Image (cartoon, rainbow, N blue to C red):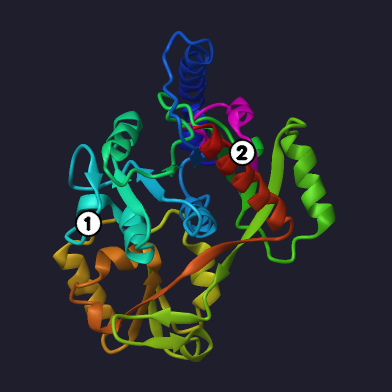
Amino acid sequence: MNLLRKILFPFAILYGFITSIRNYLFDTGVLKAYSFDLPVIAVGNLSVGGTGKTPQIEYLIRLLSGKYKVATLSRGYKRQSEGFVLANDSSDALQLGDEPFQFYQKFKNIQVAVDANRKNGIEQLLSNSNAPEVILLDDAFQHRKVKAGFYIMLTSYGDLYCDDFMLPTGNLRESRSGVQRANVVIVTKCPSNLSLDAQNKIKKQLRLSSNQNLFFTFIEYDEVVYSEKETLKVEGIKSLNKILLAGIAKPESFFAHLKQENDECLTFPDHHHFSESELLEIKKKASNKIIVTTEKDYVRLKGSILSGQLYFLPIKSTFLSDEDSFNENILNYVGQSTRNS
């Protein structure tokens, strides 16, 4: 923890007090939370960014979209539009935000919507003639105005919420007690060989309730990078001199997976919108080298002056164990809620 964050500790206590009061008002019904007659699954975290929400949402899409009409609803962080927007063939990352646009590009059999007001967003989706049967709320753990039927809370292996502090001293958006709202907690970005002993140690640290289920996942990288025109094997490009570019919250594992001695890593803020001057500078540094970026960055950079040498590396969330148990949790909730509705 750096010195500035330590100095700001009194503000962290104040922020924690304010968020605790807000949660108390929702818990006691003083502030109204709205529920809906269809399965609503909220995926989020207690901390700021970098826990792997996007691959987890994509996992749920793959699990559910073959059986149900699925919609995702996101805030659309840093988009250049306002209000409710339902993705269509003319949409782009500027209108939707990078993550929703990524969902829309990859999964043509679902609806993708953005609205900072999740209640309004759900109502708009349900008013369509092709209304969804399941809605996935992206990054909505603190959006208390909508009461989801099922909450999935993510926490990173290297940055567990139980070891963190409130903003601005730490990275928590609310106190650790917020975990009590979760039906399922997933420890993300684990080493793929994390032992059962290490998992049990983390389980003791988190001290979840008996009615909460805990799972562990790791990031699995694709064996291929993709461009607009071709694919290349990851093993083949590792020996090439290249530029690695990332504008995500925690890019270290992406760089570590691909980086060789002569590669240059370029880091930008999360959800960064690249200016023309930045694109020109990147192109100058790259010269005739290939540029490999994350899938989330690619949807913002596609069609730019970098396109001719730009590739992206897809990732997915993979369970260390008990994947069937997780799937059963989700499918049972959705199936029961669908029947009830």
Classify mark 2: residues with Cα within 10 Å, few (<14), some (14-19) or many (20+). Answer: many
283 versus 278 height, above or below? below
Which percent across, then down, holds residue 55?
50, 58
Report the number of numbered marks. Answer: 2
Classify mark 1: residues with Cα within 10 Å, few (<14), some (14-19) or many (20+). Answer: few
Q: In terms of secondary structure, where does tag 2 sit?
A: helix
Residue 214, image quadrant:
top right
Asked whether residue 276 is drawn in magenta, I would say no
User: Which amino acid does the dot numbered 2 rest on?
Assistant: Tyr
Q: Nearer the viewer, residue 28 or 205?
A: 28
221 versus 174 height, above or below? below
Which percent across, then down, holds residue 82?
19, 39
Instruction: Please name the residue shown 57% across and 32% down the image.
Output: 165
59 versus 224 height, above or below? above
Instruction: Please name the residue shown 33% across and 41% down the image.
Output: 75
**Earlier sequence position, callout 2 versus callout 1:** 1
The answer for how far apart the CA atoms under marks 2 and 1 are is 37 Å
Instruction: Please name the residue shown 80% across and 60% down the image.
Output: 195
Instruction: Please name the residue shown 20% across and 51% down the image.
Output: 95
Q: Which mark is residue 161?
A: 2
Asked whether the viewer can see residue 184, the reply is yes
Q: Which mark is residue 88?
A: 1
333 versus 280 height, above or below? above
Q: Which residues are magenta?
A: 168-185
User: Which amino acid does the dot numbered 1 rest on?
Assistant: Asn
